C-alpha cells in the first residue's frame, strides 16, 4: 500500500477488570509457527530490557518536543535469532499521566502506521480535549520503530538523487513510461541493499511486533496497552497472536486486512479500488458546493475539470515545481482526510481562474531549504527515510510477484475500474518485484476464544487506505474483538478525531475495558459478535480561499499539527 503523508490528526457492557490488569504469566507460549530461536531471543531481550529500563530525560532538539515530554532509548536486537549480537536503539518519548497516582493505569503505547512513521509526537495529544481523560490515566508513549528517524535509520537513496518535481502521473501510462518506472524500481531496490547492507533483511513486521514486546518490558509494564492505526494495526495484530497473554488492552484504528494472502500485493489492489470510491465522494461534495469553488455542478464535471488541470500541469508545471505528479499526490492526501477538501477544492478553483499560487503552496515538494519540514522529513536527516522504511518492511514481509508482466496485467485490468490511484500504487510498491533480501512468511493472525482480552477495532466504512473489509476480517480472526464503525465516512484513522461517538467508545474502553456487547447469534456464521456504529461526522464546511484568509484559517493541513496527525497512518 502507498504510504501516507499525514501522520497525527472511540462500551457499554464491561467485560474486563477495572484498573490495572493482573500480572501476566512469567512465560508466554510462542505462537505455533513462531521460529524457536526468535522466540527465545525475544524472551532474552525482554529480560534485558526490563533490567535496564529506559532513562528518560529532556528530548534532543531534533525531536522538536517541548517539556514535559521526555525522551529515552530502548535497545532491541537487530536479529532476534541472535539476541546477544548487535542491538539497535529505538527512540522513545513519554509524557507522564496527569492524574492522581492512584488512578494511573500504566503506559499507552501508540503507533500511527506507515510503515515508516514515528509516533514520538504522540505525548502531545495529552493537551487535546479528546485525550485529556485518557492522558490523566495513562503515560502517553510514542516511539520511532526500527529504521525510522534516529532508530537505526534505513536509507535507499542518496538525497541528491530523489525526484523533487515536477513529475508526471499519467492515468494511462505508455510502454515507455512503464519501462522507465521499472528501471527506477530496480535502481531503488538495489540502493536499499547497497546503502543499508546485510541489516536490511531484519526490517519487517514480525520484528516490529517483537520490538513492541521489548518496549513493554523496558517500560516496566506487566501487560501492554497499545493503540495502532493503519499499518500499526497489522503488527499490533501480530503481537496479539505472538504474545496474547501480554495484552492488556489494544485498539486497532483503521485496520488493514491481516489475512496472509493479502500481505501486501493483494491489499494494494483492494486499496486502489477503494480510492476510486473515495475520489467519487470528493467529487460529489465539490459539486454540491459549485458556487463556492466553481469546479462543476455534477461529479462528472468536477472530474473533467480535475483532468483539465492535470493535463495543463503535465504540459506546463505550475511555478516550475508542480506537475501532474505533485497535483495527484496532494489530491490523494485529501482522500485520507476530508478536512483537506476545502483547501484542495479552493486551490483547484483558483488555478482554473488563472491563479496557480494556492496550488503551488499546497502541492509543491517541500525541502529543508524551502520551508518548515514536513513530518517524515523531521524524523530523519534523510528526507527519503519514511519511504525507505515503508519499502523495506513491505518487501521483506511477504512474497511479491517478480515478473512485471503480472503487475502490468493485474493493474491494467484494475485501472479500467479504478484509474485514480492504481498506477501510482504500482510505482510506490514496484521495488518489491526486484527485492533481493529474504522474504518472511506472513503469520496467520488468529486467536481462539478466551485467549485474548477483548480488543477494540475502529473503522470508517468508506476508508480508502484501509478498506472496511479489513476491519471485519480482523474481528473474525481475534476472538471476542469488538468493532465500532463510523457509517458513511471515509477518514483514515478515526480515534480521537472529529466523531464524539467514536471517541466515547475509545475513551470508555481505555479507561474501563468496556466494549460493545455481543449481538444476537447468527450475525456472523452463528456466532454472536460485538459491534456498534456511529453516525458520520459532519462533512467539511465549504470555505473559499478568500474566506479562509479572512478568518485566518490555514489554507492547508500539512500534517505538522497534532490534530492533523492523530489516527493517520498507512
Image: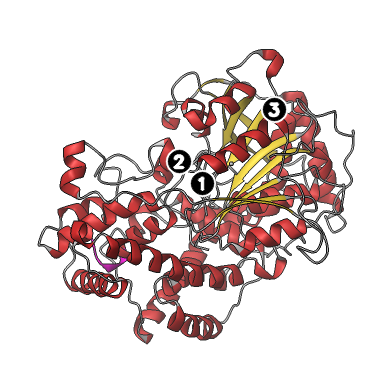
**In this view of the protein, can residue 301 be seen by the observer?**
yes
Please tell me whether mark 1 sits on a helix, a strand or a loop.
loop
Left or right position of 149 against 15? left
Residue at (80, 29) in percent of width and height:
21
The x and y percentages for residue 544 are 20, 50
Specify the label residue 219 is tagged with: 3
**In this view of the protein, can residue 445 be seen by the observer?**
no
Left or right position of 433 against 383? right
Specify the label residue 117 is tagged with: 1
Bounds of the magenta span?
321-325
Residue 164 sits in quarter:
bottom left
Which of the two marks, 1 or 2, is nearer to us in this view?
Answer: 1
**Contact flag, marks 1 and 2 (Cβ < 8 Å):** yes
* 80 part of magenta stretch: no
Specify the label residue 379 is tagged with: 2
3D distance between C-alphas at marks 2 and 3 = 22 Å
The x and y percentages for residue 248 are 76, 36
Q: Earlier in the sequence, mark 2 or mark 3?
A: 3
Residue at (15, 65) in percent of width and height:
352
3D distance between C-alphas at marks 1 and 2 = 8 Å
Amino acid at each position: 500500500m502507498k504510504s501516507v503523508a499525514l501522520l497525527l490528526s472511540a462500551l457499554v457492557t464491561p467485560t474486563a477488570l477495572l484498573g490495572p490488569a493482573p500480572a501476566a504469566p512469567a512465560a508466554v507460549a510462542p505462537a505455533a509457527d513462531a521460529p524457536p530461536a526468535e522466540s527465545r531471543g525475544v524472551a532474552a531481550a525482554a529480560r534485558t530490557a526490563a533490567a535496564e529500563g529506559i532513562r528518560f530525560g529532556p528530548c534532543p532538539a531534533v525531536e522538536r518536543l517541548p517539556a514535559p515530554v521526555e525522551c529515552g532509548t530502548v535497545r532491541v536486537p537487530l536479529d532476534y535469532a541472535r539476541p546477544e549480537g548487535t542491538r539497535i536503539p529505538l527512540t522513545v518519548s513519554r509524557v507522564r499521566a496527569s492524574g492522581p497516582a492512584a488512578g494511573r493505569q500504566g503506559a499507552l503505547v501508540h503507533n500511527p502506521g506507515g510503515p515508516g512513521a514515528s509516533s514520538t509526537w504522540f505525548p502531545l495529544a495529552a493537551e487535546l480535549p479528546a485525550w485529556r481523560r485518557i492522558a490523566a490515566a495513562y503515560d502517553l508513549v510514542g516511539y520511532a520503530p526500527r529504521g525510522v528517524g534516529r532508530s537505526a535509520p534505513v536509507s535507499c537513496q542518496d538525497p541528491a538523487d530523489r525526484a523533487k518535481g515536477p513529475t508526471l502521473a499519467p492515468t494511462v501510462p505508455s510502454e515507455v513510461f512503464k519501462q522507465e518506472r521499472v528501471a527506477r524500481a530496480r535502481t531503488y531496490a538495489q540502493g536499499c541493499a547497497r546503502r543499508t547492507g546485510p541489516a536490511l533483511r531484519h526490517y519487517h513486521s514480525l520484528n516490529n511486533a517483537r520490538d513492541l514486546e521489548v518496549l513493554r518490558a523496558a517500560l516496566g509494564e506487566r501487560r501492554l496497552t497499545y493503540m495502532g492505526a493503519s499499518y500499526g494495526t497489522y503488527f499490533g495484530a501480530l503481537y496479539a497472536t505472538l504474545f496474547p497473554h501480554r495484552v492488556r488492552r489494544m485498539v486497532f484504528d483503521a485496520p488493514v486486512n491481516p489475512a496472509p494472502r493479502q500481505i501486501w500485493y493483494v491489499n494494494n489492489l483492494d486499496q486502489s479500488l477503494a480510492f476510486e470510491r473515495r475520489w467519487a465522494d470528493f467529487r460529489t461534495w465539490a459539486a454540491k458546493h459549485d458556487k463556492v469553488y466553481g469546479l462543476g455542478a455534477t461529479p462528472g464535471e468536477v472530474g473533467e475539470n480535475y483532468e483539465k488541470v492535470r493535463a495543463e500541469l503535465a504540459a506546463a508545471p505550475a511555478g516550475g515545481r508542480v506537475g501532474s505528479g505533485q497535483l495527484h499526490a496532494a489530491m490523494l492526501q485529501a482522500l485520507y482526510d476530508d478536512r483537506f477538501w476545502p483547501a484542495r477544492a479552493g486551490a483547484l478553483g483558483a488555478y482554473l481562474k488563472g491563479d496557480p499560487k494556492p496550488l503551488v503552496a499546497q502541492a509543491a515538494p517541500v525541502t529543508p531549504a524551502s520551508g518548515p519540514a514536513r513530518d517524515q522529513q523531521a524524523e530523519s536527516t534523510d528526507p527519503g527515510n519514511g519511504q525507505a522504511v515503508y519499502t523495506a518492511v513491505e518487501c521483506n514481509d511477504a512474497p511479491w510477484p517478480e515478473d512485471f508482466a503480472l503487475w502490468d496485467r493485474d493493474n491494467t485490468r484494475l485501472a479500467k475500474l479504478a484509474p485514480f490511484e492504481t498506477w501510482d500504487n504500482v510505482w510506490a510498491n514496484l521495488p518489491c518485484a526486484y527485492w533481493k533480501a529474504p522474504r518472511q512468511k506472513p503469520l496467520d493472525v488468529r486467536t481462539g476464544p478466551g485467549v485474548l482480552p477483548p480488543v477494540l477495532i475502529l473503522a470508517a466504512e468508506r476508508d480508502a487506505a484501509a478498506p472496511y473489509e479489513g476491519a471485519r476480517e480482523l474481528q473474525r480472526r481475534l476472538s471476542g474483538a469488538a468493532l465500532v464503525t463510523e457509517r458513511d465516512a471515509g477518514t483514515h484513522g478515526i480515534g480521537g478525531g472529529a466523531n464524539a461517538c467514536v471517541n466515547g467508545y475509545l475513551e470508555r474502553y481505555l479507561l474501563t475495558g468496556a466494549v460493545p456487547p455481543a449481538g444476537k447469534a447468527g450475525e456472523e456464521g452463528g456466532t454472536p459478535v460485538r459491534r456498534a456504529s456511529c453516525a458520520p461526522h459532519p462533512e467539511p464546511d465549504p470555505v473559499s480561499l478568500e474566506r479562509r484568509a479572512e478568518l485566518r484559517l490555514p489554507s492547508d493541513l500539512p500534517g505538522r499539527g497534532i490534530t492533523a496527525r492523530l489516527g493517520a497512518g498507512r
